[in-house]
Amino acid sequence: MTSFKSLYHQLVHAALEDQLEERLNGGLFDPYDDHQLDCLLHPEKHPVVWRVGPCTCSSQEQKECAGSCPFDAIEPNHADGIHIDAAQCLGCAQCVQNCKAEKLTASRDIIPALKAVRSSKTLVYALVAPAFLGQFGPDITPGKLRNALKAVGFDGMLEVALFADILTLKEALEFDANIHNESDYQLTSCCCPMWIAMIRKVYRQLVPHVPASVSPMVACGRTVKHLHPDAVTVFIGPCMAKKAEAREKDLAGAVDYVLTFQEMQDIFDALDIDPTQMQESDRDHSSRLGRIYARAGGVSEAVQSTVERLNPHRDIAVRTQRADGVPACKAMLSDVLSGKVEANFYEGMGCVGGCVGGPKALLPTAEGAQNIDQYGDRATYPTPIDNPYVIELLSRLGFDHVEQLLQDSEIFSRYF
């Protein structure tokens, strides 16, 4: 029986050569496990963490495995070993990293995404997370990455940082409109699905303090679908939890597939594409504040700066507190729930270091954060308010003025 890794690479190459159906129907793959094949061909039918073999751990080891999950999604001692509750799993990848038997792996959307990309039937857009800088090689630019993705078969690329700009502006407007007393506070960041799910599932009493905002990924996907209803959207980032977010009932349909940086690198390797060698076609669409969303503290800094830009004479200034990593986020939320409110703007990021510390990032967290800061410093526009592309895009979406972001919107709002 072929290994999961071998089957995965065989399928990737077949999909890139447009021979997937022919080879499947002709029985041209090495002997494979039916469950593994179904996971790779139909990832939407399975949880975001896959079993790729029987659990061989002892009862005690299974209990340790279950205890390592910060969201209690693992139940030990089932007939087939551990059981992962798809409804509780948020895609933090702790179980994958801690599995001693290496029988767990992250969901992979790569095969259906490649089939969509290689098809000429519709437009396919890559939505690239702000954490991309340096992930696919040194000195990578949006322009070089855009051309590399076009070489794969994508019709276009959008930087999700532009939509981080829009959500920053929305949350800054929310803060300015709603925080008037020393006891008021707002919880963010909408960009991290683990943080939002943590509040919704574990700290439900705090939900009224969360602005009704979608994540930049979802905002980007919904915008593409609004402007091009038949388009296919593929998010590319360092995060497994984004796979779970894209499937949530109230968000489903905005993003068709989620690829990790590792999956995208596998495609580049299979096609022998080096993004650093691509021609430049740079377009400066995002502000500094949208770009720094990818590292811990970036959202707090972005919203604080934007509030100060919107209303420099506020009586109550923005006082931020942040946490990164699930344990630190839980500790901060528990303090807030117990009445220890020391700030009026709270940022949480599920991964240590923020998105650049995601489980499928290709760079060390510190290096990724440094790249993000440098990329932010090169931005033409310091804040979303200074960014003409924000105003232009909002206008195309029917917003006559930015204050309309405070109203319910089928693109930027989420109803918890």
Image: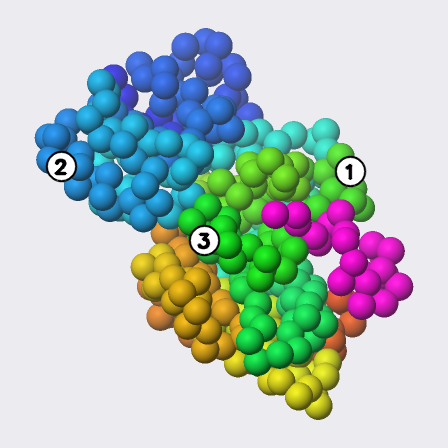
- Nearer the observer: mark 1 or 2; the answer is 2
Disc number placed over residue 216 in the picture, else none: none
- Nearer the observer: mark 3 or 1; the answer is 3
Q: Give the residue displayed 60% in from the left and 35% down from the top.
A: 249
Q: Position of residue 116 (x, y in %)?
A: 61, 32
Which segment did they paint magenta? 392-416
User: In terms of depth relative to the viewer, which is nearer, 81 or 321?
Assistant: 321
Q: Give the residue displayed 22% in from the left and 31% down from the top.
A: 76
Give the labeled residue for mark 2. Answer: 61
Compared with 85, 367 (above or below) is below
Q: Position of residue 383 (x, y in %)?
A: 67, 77
Q: Quadrant of the N terminus?
A: top left
Q: CA distance from mark 3 to mark 1?
A: 36 Å
Within 10 Å of the Cα at label 1, are there few (<14), some (14-19), or many (20+) other Cα atoms?
few
Give the labeled residue for mark 3. Answer: 203
Q: Give the residue displayed 11% in from the left and 35% down from the top.
A: 60
Which comes before the other along the chain, label 1 or label 2? 2
Give the labeled residue for mark 1. Answer: 229
Which comes before the other along the chain, label 3 or label 2? 2
> In the image, 194: left or right of 228?
left
Within 10 Å of the Cα at label 2, are there few (<14), some (14-19), or many (20+) other Cα atoms?
some
> In the image, 1: left or right of 154?
left
Q: Main secondary structure of the magenta part?
A: loop
> In the image, 325: left or right of 132?
left
Amino acid, disc 3 = Tyr
Compared with 99, 368 (above or below) is below
Amino acid, disc 1 = Pro
Which comes before the other along the chain, label 3 or label 1? 3
Q: Quadrant of residue 179?
A: bottom right
User: In terms of depth relative to the viewer, which is nearer, 65 or 387?
Assistant: 65
